[in-house]
Amino acid sequence: MLKLIQTPHAPKPFSNYSQAVMVEAGSRLLHVAGQVGATLEGVIPDDPQRQHELAWANVLAILKAAGMSHDNIVDAHVFITDRTHIGIYREVRDRVLKGHRPAATLLVISGLADPRLVVEVAVVAAAPAT
């Protein structure tokens, strides 16, 4: 259902993501709004690693509610507020995705809606039509 597209006519990915992912016609698409590193109670931890873990956990919870998993992620857009957290981002992403390689965009930005937040993760996922 998901076809990874790689071409030697564009630069190779700099880490574990695909140049592009094609979704078969008729698939169910899910657009997950940006998820931040907050607990269910709205607590924002001070620890950047914990925020990254929570942001991805929140994404996975929404995917599960839609009958999907990390394997269904087609595209991930991640926004971080500190470039020194790129290593944290990659380590947590790789652990969560377990070898799955969606298309991905990482942006280092000046801030998020709440200044305590250091990461936001938005994904598009696809699954076979039911």
Image (tube, helix red, strand yellow):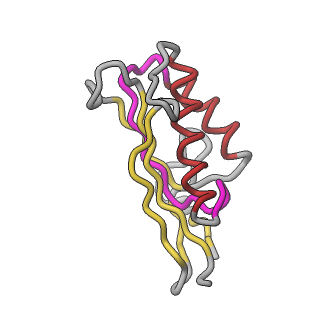
Quadrant in the picture for the C terminus: bottom right
The one nearer the camera, 116 or 40, is: 40
User: Is 123 situated left or right of 93 in this image?
Assistant: left
| Residue occupying image coordinates x 49% and y 71% | 29
| Residue occupying image coordinates x 63% and y 63% | 68
The one nearer the camera, 105 or 60, is: 60
Quarter of the image for residue 93 reads top right
Q: Give the image location of residue 28, x and y in percent.
A: 53, 76
Q: What stretch is highlighted in magenta?
A: 68-85
Q: Give the image location of residue 6, x and y in percent.
A: 57, 62
Q: Give the image location of residue 73, x and y in percent.
A: 57, 58
Quarter of the image for residue 112 reads top left
The one nearer the camera, 75 or 59, is: 59
User: Is 73 situated left or right of 32 in this image?
Assistant: right
| Residue occupying image coordinates x 73% and y 45% | 98
Q: Is residue 80 magenta?
A: yes
Q: Is residue 73 magenta?
A: yes
| Residue occupying image coordinates x 43% and y 61% | 31
